[in-house]
Image: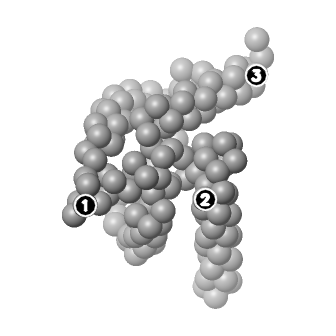
Amino acid sequence: MPRQLLVSLAAMTSGFVFGFGLILAGMANPGKVLAFLDLAGPWDPSLALVMGGAIGIAVVAFSIAKVRNLSFLGLPIDLPKATVLDKRLLSGSLAFGVGWGLTGICPGPSLVLLGTGNFNGLVFFIAMLAGMGLYEVIGTVKAKEND
């Protein structure tokens, strides 16, 4: 089997497993997410278990990736090397957190909701694309100012 086909099949399978996991865990349900974030109201701690499980899997995966040069499919592994908490990282984290807190939707589940025809998922997805576009425009303008 050609490597590119294998890589594409692995990516597609990973996407389906991720999307199914989001649905199964309730992460694609904005109401459930908002109930987790609402500490003063009817708090639902179940998503903490989902996050804990995800962190556990990520710790194992990154531990393996740190000692390898190539992925299991033979592709180069290029892990982020940044260690500084700068204004860009903090403002991006703040924007993500505010968006998640207001809507109960984050980028992965927005794709699941988009696929189900959910109107709120569509609005979130469009707003997310607009935000990414704005980021590119601001980055281009700042790069030109620094030249």
How far from the left and from the top, in percent, is residue 145? Answer: 64, 88
For marks 2 and 1, the one nearer the N-term is 1
Question: Hey, what amino acid is under mark 2?
Answer: Asn
Mark 3 against mark 1, which lies toward the viewer? 1
Circle 1 Cα neighbour tier, 10 Å, few/some/many (<14 / 14–19 / ≥20): few
Image quarter in which the N terminus is found? top right
Tell me which residue sits at (69%, 47%) in the image: 117
SS at circle 1 = loop
Tell me which residue sits at (48%, 46%) in the image: 29
Q: Nearer the viewer, residue 120 or 107?
A: 120
Q: Using the rendered view, name the quadrant where residue 119 is placed.
A: bottom right
Q: Which residue is mark 2?
A: 120
Tell me which residue sits at (43%, 52%) in the image: 31
Tell me which residue sits at (60%, 43%) in the image: 112
Q: Which mark is residue 5?
A: 3
Position of residue 19 relative to residue 138, above or below, is above
Mark 2 against mark 3, which lies toward the viewer? 2
